[in-house]
Image (cartoon, coloured by chain):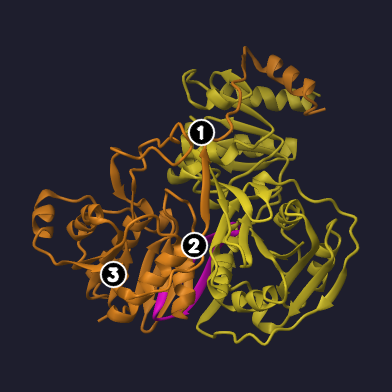
Amino acid sequence: MRKILVTLKRVVDYNVRVRVKPDGSGMAVEGLKMSVNPFDEIALEEALRMRERGEAGEILAVTIGGDECQQQLRTGLAMGADRALLVKCEGEVEPLAAAGILLEVIRREEPDIVIMGKQAIDDDCNQTGQMLATLWGRPQATFASELNLNGDTARVTREVDAGLEVLEVQLPALITTDLRLNEPRYIKLPDIMKARRKPLETLAADDLELAAPPALKALAYEPPAQREKGVVVEDVPALMGMLRERGFLN
Amino acid sequence: MSSVLIVAEHDGQTLHAGVARAASCGLAIGADRLDVAVLGLDCEGVAQQAARIEGVSRVLSLDRSENANPVAAIQAPQVAALASQGYSHVLGPSTTFGKDLMPRVAALLGVPQVSDIMSVEGERRFKRPIYAGNAVLTVEAPAGHIVVGTARLASWPAAGEGGDAAVEGAQTDAELPDHTSWLELKSAESERPDLQSASVVVSGGRALGSSENFSLLYDLADRLGAAVGASRAAVDAGYVSNDMQVGQTGKIIAPDLYFAIGISGAIQHLTGIKDAGVIVAINKDPEAPIFEIADIGLVGDLFAIVPEIQAAVEGS
């Protein structure tokens, strides 16, 4: 039976507006509500549906970070993952370093399919899945909106700028999710209770003895440039007048 | 001294408009050599279009059957091999094409990627948006390594036409995988301008109420020569297809004139339009957040206002 690895990143909840610290040294995230990256929830939901259709067996949820990330793994277990793994590591982990760590996890776990969110809503990089697939030497199907398994291949519909593209990839493969792939389920209280008894392992990233890859240096954070508030006009003729003044519709 | 390689996006016939914008980003790095790589099959026409972008030194054409359709796992080894031939930077457009491909190139080269470059602050120093555009981060790429990045198209003007670069056939001995098959592209046929390069865009939100009602916007757009977009709410409600979505989770655009019609203005939509020239908002709720960033606002019923604009445009 196919084994599925899903990654879950701990991020500031998507409903919370995050601001830059006044001294520009970072983002003011202390005390904010934290959640599973929404694209990663979609990844886990897709894995659960595969298992429910009898297309997959074990589902492993993995994250990288500090002890606080156990909270997001517990959420994943409550949604229905069978096992969870925290690779413990302090500080910022960039996509290339994360991909290196996840490759080690893949070597140990040998999944048939890895499903990840297309991007995390904090750094908005949209890189880790592609980098991991590359280091793994396996195909990728990014921005998936439909996923169908057939033997040792997957047919994936991808949301691209020009429309919908269909790829067929040989398994093992890496898939990244777009918003329309599915709508993740809500967690019920009994599931949270059950999740407490599911296995959550930890592994120290240092014990993997990986060489740190070259990394970007974050120099400064600043708020985005604001547009100035404009004017409200009374009616269509006033609107048309202003547009013509600015050189439009002439 | 920088030498920049830009990976061209195209559909086999036409060069994507984003390539000329990525070229502006490359020129801002201070490139004394700016080459464009065109990977395709029988793509001579596309290579010629790339050669006309002002500032381009050379177009490298990798014409082979494996490149008939854009598959990241097949293109990346070729791009990485080319990039290793003395380039300091390799850039792609921050479109679904570039987002799919460039991290694979970065991973093959063993370097980090700078996604969504908004501005160039130095040869290795760039600004990029994070947290859905709620902050701008300045990053520095590590010294001694090639820089891989994607250019956020809305931040860059298209480089001019009128260049006359040489087109050269190029080859790499990169090993190409056969684990991925490209099957088809289902695209919504449209006679209207492309959303990402149109100078005028008319977008509708959930207040349109149905997919039939979007015809109001199509009529206006056709009269204005505009592209039609939509908010995520309108897409989620099923009024239009997702390739029309404007916003953080859809397309980020910078037209000269943008009409937000019946769009309340969720943060994620505003992120997609904040580089537009003039934003016109039409909404019946005077408290809608869209009015916070609109240059010209009109409060009222869109079903009365849009036909009136249409009539005014036709009368002019």
Q: Secondary structure at mark 1?
A: helix
User: Residue at image x 44%, y 42%?
Assistant: A26
For marks 1 and 3, give the CA distance: 36 Å
Tell which subunit mark 3 falls on: A
Q: Which contiguous range is marked in magenta?
A: A156-173
Specify the label residue A50 is tagged with.
3
Specify the label residue A127 is tagged with.
2
Amino acid type of disc 1?
A: Leu
User: Residue at image x 31%, y 66%?
Assistant: A6
Q: Which chain's colour is orange?
A: A
Specify the label residue B239 is tagged with.
none
User: Residue at image x 19%, y 62%?
Assistant: A80
- Callout 3: 10 Å neighbours few (<14), some, many (20+)? some
Look at chain B in the picture and name its colour.
yellow
Q: Is residue A182 visible?
A: yes
Q: Secondary structure at mark 3?
A: helix
Q: Which residue is mark 1?
A: B208
Question: Residue B192: x, y in percent?
Answer: 70, 48
Amino acid type of disc 2?
A: Gln
